Amino acid sequence: MNGATTSWSVLGVVVQVMLVIAGAPVLVALMRQVRARLEGRVGAGLGQPWRDLRKQLRKESIAPDGSTMVFAAAPAVALSSMVLIVCAAPFITTTSPLDGVADLFAVVSLLLVASIALALAGLDTGSAFGGMGSSRTVTVAALAEPTLLVAGFALSVQVGSSNLASLVEHGQRVPGTILSPASLLAAVALWIVVVAEAGRLPVDNPSTHLELTMIHEATILEYAGPDLAMVELGSAMRLAVLLGLWGNLFLPWGVATTAGPGTLALGAIVFVVKVAALGAVLAASEVFMAKWRLFRVPELLAGSFLFSVLAVSSSFFLS
Amino acid sequence: MSVALFSQLLYLLCGGLLLSSVLMLWRRQLSALVGLLAAQGVLLAGMAALLGTQDGGLELYVVALGILVLKGGVLPAVLRRVLANSGAARETQPLVNVPASLLAAAMLTLLAYAVSRPLVELDPTPITHAAPVGIAMVLLGFFMLVTRRRALSQVAGFLLLDNGIAATAFLVTSGVPLIVELAVSMDLLLVVLVLQVLTVRLRTAFGDTDIGELRELKD
C-alpha cells in the first residue's frame, strides 16, 4: 500500500466516524418522524435529537449519592466502544488501516461491553428501577449474543474468515452467496437480534418511560446533563452501527473496496441511503406492532437462535 | 440451465421450505399457518418444475402444476373455510411451549442431517445434498402433529409432514412417477376433507376444536 492510498483510507475512516456520529441522532429523528407521519402526527423534525443533546450538554452533571466510578465511567465506556466499532468496521470503505481489528466476533464483544457498562451503572445507582433495567438488559443480551455469534459463524464459514471487510468483499465479488439459504436464514436471525440489541419494538419501546416496559430507559434513569447526552448519543450510534452492519453484510453493494475520492464519496452516499432506508422500514413496521410481554421475548430470541442454527447447518448440508 | 444456477435455485427453494416449516412451529396464529402452508405448496411446485428442467420430460411439469393447484390453492382454501367456521384464532396451549419446540426443531434438523449422511454419500449430487431438508420437514411435521392441540394446527402438521415426504421423494428420486403423485394427492385431499368434516362435528359437539376434549367417551 503506497502513501497516497494509505492517506485516502485514513480519510475514509475519519469520514466514516464523522458521518456516524453526526448522522446517528438524525437517524433516530428520521425513525421518529416516519412513525409520527404514519400515525397522523406532524412530528418534531429531523433536528430534534441534536437540539436535545445541545440542551443536555449545557446542564449540570449530577450523580446519585453513593454512586461510584462505575456510574461515572459507564457513558464514556459505552460511547467509546461505539466509536471504536465505527473506526474498525467497514461501513463506507473496506480498506481501513484498523482492518485487523474488524473481526465480527470482536465487534459483537464491543457491543456487549457497551451494554454491560450501562447495566453495571444501573446496578450501581442502587435504585429499584436501575436494578430491574439491568436485569432485563442482561437477560436480553444473554439471549441475543449466542444468536449473533452462531449467525456470524454461518456467514464466516462461506468466506473462510470472520473479518468483516472480507465478508463484505466476498459478498460483492460473489453475489450468489447472499441468496444462499444459509445467508438468508442468517439475515432473518440477525434482523431479530438487531431489533433486540437496539432496543426497538417488540422487545423494548424506546419512546416510553412506563415502568412495566422499560429496559434500556430504566438503566439510564439516573443520568442527567452531559452524561445523559453521551448515553443518548451512544444508543443512537448503536442503532446506526447495527443497521449499518446488517445492511453491509446482506446488501454489500456500494461499499468502497479501493481507497480513492470517487469510491469514498459513493460509499458514503450509499451507506447513508442504506441505513436511512433500513431505519425507515424498521420504524414503519413498528407502527403495526405492540410491545411483547417480557416473558415472550425469549420466544422471539429462541426463534432467532433457531434460524441461526439452521443457517449454520444449511451452510453445511446445502453446499 | 447451467449446473451452478440450477443448484443455487434448488438450494434457495430448499431454504425457503425449511424456513416456512420452522415458521409454522413459531407462529401461533392459525391464519398464519394456512398462509405458510400455501407458500410452502408454491415452493414445492417450484421445486418440481425446477427438477423438470433437468429431467427433460413433461411429467414433472404436470406434477408441478398439480402440486401448485392442490397445495398452493385448494388445500389452503379448505383450511381457510374451516378456520372461518371454527372461531378459534390461535393455538393457545401447545403441549410443548414455543421456545422449547423451537429448540427441539433445531435438534430435529441436525438429526435429519445426521441420519441422511449415508444416503447422501451413496450418490453425492447437488440434488441429494439437499435431501436432509426433506427429512427435516418430515420430522418437524411429526413434531407439530404430536404437540399441538387445536384440530386445525394438527391438520397443518399433517400437511407439513406430507410436504416433507414429497420434498424427500423429489430430492432422492429426482421426480416421482405421475401416477404415484396423483394417488398421493387424491388421498391427501380426501384426508383433509374428512378432517374438515370432523372439525366441524367437533365444534358442534364441544363448542371448541381442542382435541383434548376427545379423551372422555360421550354418547
Image (tube, coloured by chain):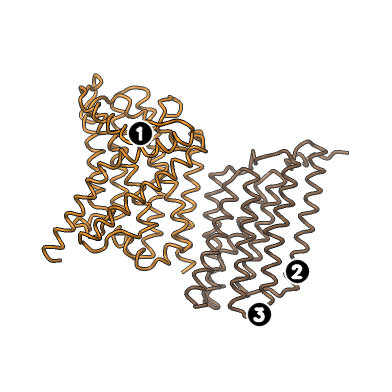
Chain colours: A orange, B brown
Q: What element carries label 3?
A: loop
Quadrant position of the C terminus of chain B in the picture: top right
Per the image, the residue denoted by label 3 is B57
In this orientation, which residue lies closer to the viewer: A259 or B116?
A: A259
Circle 3 packing at 10 Å, graded few (<14), some (14-19), many (20+), is few
Q: Are marks 2 and 1 in contact (CB under 8 Å)?
A: no
Left or right position of A61 against B75: left
Q: What element carries label 2?
A: helix
In this orientation, which residue lies closer to the viewer: B201 or B60?
A: B60
For residue B19, the mark is: none
Residue positioned most to the right: B219
Q: Looking at the rendering, which quadrant does residue A53 occupy?
A: top left
Q: Which amino acid does label 3 sit on?
A: Gly
Residue A150 % position (x, y): 40, 54
Residue positioned most to the left: A3
Q: Is mark 1 on a helix, strand or loop?
A: loop
Q: Which amino acid does label 1 sit on?
A: Gly
Per the image, the residue denoted by label 2 is B182
Please give the name of the residue rendered at 28% of the width and 27% of the height, measured from the top-left corner: A124
Q: How far apart are marks 2 and 1 (CA)?
A: 61 Å
Q: How far apart are marks 2 and 3 (CA)?
A: 17 Å
Left or right position of A2 against A173: left
Residue B134 % position (x, y): 59, 64
Q: Of the residues tagged 2 and 3, which is closer to the observer?
A: 3
Q: Looking at the rendering, which quadrant does residue A220 occupy?
A: top left
